[in-house]
Image (spheres, rainbow, N blue to C red):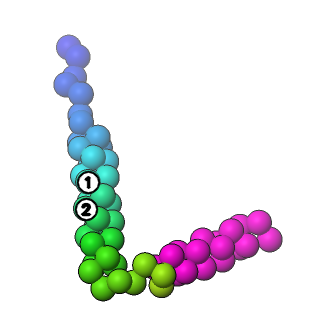
């Protein structure tokens, strides 16, 4: 007899995506509320550039 498929991993994946979207949205709302776009862009660029250098060096 065939077993019923287990969708628990799929449900966890969907939950993680929803949490990431909600967390990112909340963060961007706070950045907009306090007018910190310049600092946000600079910090994301710094972290991204640093990770790029570490990966390719």
Kindly give the residue lying farthest to the front in the view shown: 35
Instruction: Report whether residue 15 is seen.
Output: yes
Please give the residue where the numbered disc 1 appears in the rendered image.
18
Residue 50: quarter of image: bottom right
Instruction: Answer above or below: position of 54 versus 19.
Output: below
Q: Is residue 22 left or right of residue 57?
A: left
Quadrant of the image containing the C terminus: bottom right
Q: Position of residue 47 (x, y in %)?
A: 58, 77
Residue drawn at the location 23% of the way across and 16% of the way down: 2
Residue 14 image offset from top left, x and y in percent: 27, 46
Mark number displayed over residue 22 = 2
Q: In the picture, which quadrant includes the N terminus? A: top left
Work out which residue is located at the far top of the displayed protein and give it.
1
Q: Quadrant of residue 19?
A: bottom left
Tell me the element at label 1: helix
For this rendering, which residue is in front, 21 or 12?
Answer: 21
> Cβ–Cβ below 8 Å for labels 1 and 2?
yes
Give percent across and percent down for residue 45: 58, 74
The magenta stretch is 40-57
């Amino acid at each position: 007899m065939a077993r019923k498929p287990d969708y628990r991993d799929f449900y966890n994946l969907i939950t993680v995506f929803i949490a990431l979207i909600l967390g990112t949205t909340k963060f961007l709302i706070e950045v907009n509320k306090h007018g910190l776009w310049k600092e946000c862009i600079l910090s994301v660029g710094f972290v991204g550039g640093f990770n790029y250098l570490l990966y390719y060096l």
